Image (spheres, rainbow, N blue to C red):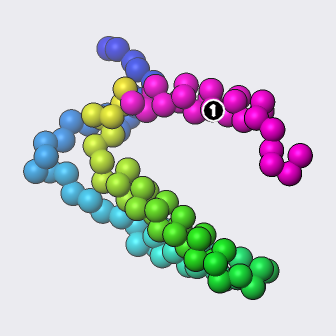
Amino acid sequence: MKNSPLSFSVNMRMSSNQRQFSFDNWIIASVLILSLFGLAMIYSASHSVEMTIRQGIYLIVGLLGLFIFAISNFRKMEIFYLQSFWIGLVLLILVLFIPSEGG
């Protein structure tokens, strides 16, 4: 049996009619509540509506990305995941050599 980095005990073949999306409602609720609490803390600390709205937009984009990846078929994107690791690693190393704005 061939072992690849993403093959583990849940390596099941499911037909498209057997796939159903079930999310844990408690986890989703806790993430949303903590995110809204974080937005409230940003506003409380900065008193800036503009910064809070900008962070709220980032939050919405992040949650949309989370749900898109949650409902995607990760078996079809396995090659992309393995290659994106190296891209992410190169970007993390690149950050060490780029000077910050504040100096």
**Residue hosting label 1:** 91
Q: Position of residue 73 (x, y in %)?
A: 28, 43
- At 62% across and 26% down in the image, what residue appears? 90
- At 21% across and 57% down in the image, what residue appears? 20
67 with respect to 51 (left or right): left
Q: Above or below — where is 82 with respect to 17? A: above
Q: Report if residue 39 lies within the magenta region.
A: no
Residue located farthest toward the left when viewing the structure as drawn: 17
Kind of residue at disc 1: Leu
Q: Nearer the viewer, residue 3 or 79?
A: 79
Question: Is most of the magenta stretch helix, strand or loop?
Answer: helix
Q: Position of residue 81 (x, y in %)?
A: 43, 32
Q: Position of residue 55 (x, y in %)?
A: 60, 69
- At 14% across and 50% down in the image, what residue appears? 18
90 with respect to 95 (left or right): left
Q: Nearer the viewer, residue 9 or 92?
A: 92
Residue located farthest toward the top when viewing the structure as drawn: 1
Q: Report if residue 82 lies within the magenta region.
A: yes
- At 77% across and 80% down in the image, what residue appears? 46
Magenta range is 80-103
